Image (cartoon, coloured by chain):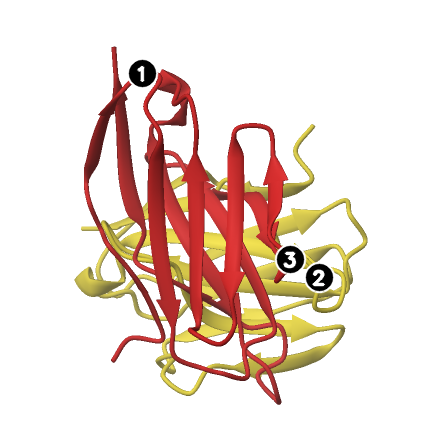
Amino acid sequence: DAMVIQNPRYQVTQFGKPVTLSCSQTLNHNVMYWYQQKSSQAPKLLFHYYDKDFNNEADTPDNFQSRRPNTSFCFLDIRSPGLGDAAMYLCATSRGENIQYFGAGTRLSVL
Amino acid sequence: RKEVEQDPGPFNVPEGATVAFNCTYSNSASQSFFWYRQDCRKEPKLLMSVYSSGNEDGRFTAQLNRASQYISLLIRDSKLSDSATYLCVVTAGGTSYGKLTFGQGTILTVHP
């Protein structure tokens, strides 16, 4: 059974139209991460929550925001998607600095 | 210089072959080391952690050389199902809490 669940698996949005991707976990892990992975590239960390503490990577555009209302859920908000934001978005969780477990990802297309 | 460098391949090998992947990392303060496997259009999945003493899991052997900042993965008796991208992954030390840094991946194709 999937332990890190991302919805939707595929998301199509229009240029400039806000979109929210969701991640939930049944592992009760205290750390949740969002990665962006473009074709033929390695995953790139956007930000992570350590418990309720939000940690943004220095090069993550302001267009990307995140919310974590509780331990189980974390959301990625893209305020004004551009064509360059089309990618696979991966959510991962860990207990402290231990191994990270990834969800199946949401593939975002921007028209 | 990239923080984690891998030979992108692709490696094309016949079933039953032995294949080795190499990876180097630039941050000498790196704490933990992993090999992840990623199938096409799927999420990365942990293959194995890598320890200084070296570790083996079935057909897979991983080695870490901290002095040379070098990590390797050996796959013996390759199967068709081993075809995937193999990602070398390193966690930073110090204040970069838990941050995974990925290599660009090495593509392996095992053919009949």
The quadrant in which the C terminus of chain B is found is top left
Chain in yellow, by letter, is: A
Chain containing the residue with disc 3: B
- Residue at 77 percent of width and 58 percent of height: A29
Q: Which of A22 and B32 is in front in this view?
A: B32
Cα distance, mark 2 to mark 1?
34 Å
Secondary structure of residue under mark 3: loop
Q: Quadrant of residue A43?
A: bottom left
Residue identified by numbered label 2: A98
CB atoms of marks 1 and 3 within 8 Å = no
Disc number for residue B53: 3
Amino acid at circle 3: Ser
Query: Residue A3's x, y, as percent?
Result: 69, 39
The chain drawn in red is B
Residue with the most extreme right position: A28
Q: Which of marks 3 and 2 is in front?
A: 3
The amino acid marked with disc number 2 is Asn
The answer to whether A101 appears left or right of B109 in the picture is right
Q: Look at the image and tell me in which quarter the N terminus of chain B lies.
A: bottom left
Mark 1 is on which residue type? Glu
Left or right: residue B5 versus residue B38 is left
Q: Position of residue A34 (x, y in %)?
A: 51, 63
Residue B15 disc label = 1
On screen, A94 above or below B59? below
User: What residue is at 67 percent from the left and 67 percent from the top?
Assistant: A68
Q: In this view, does B29 lie above or below B82?
A: below
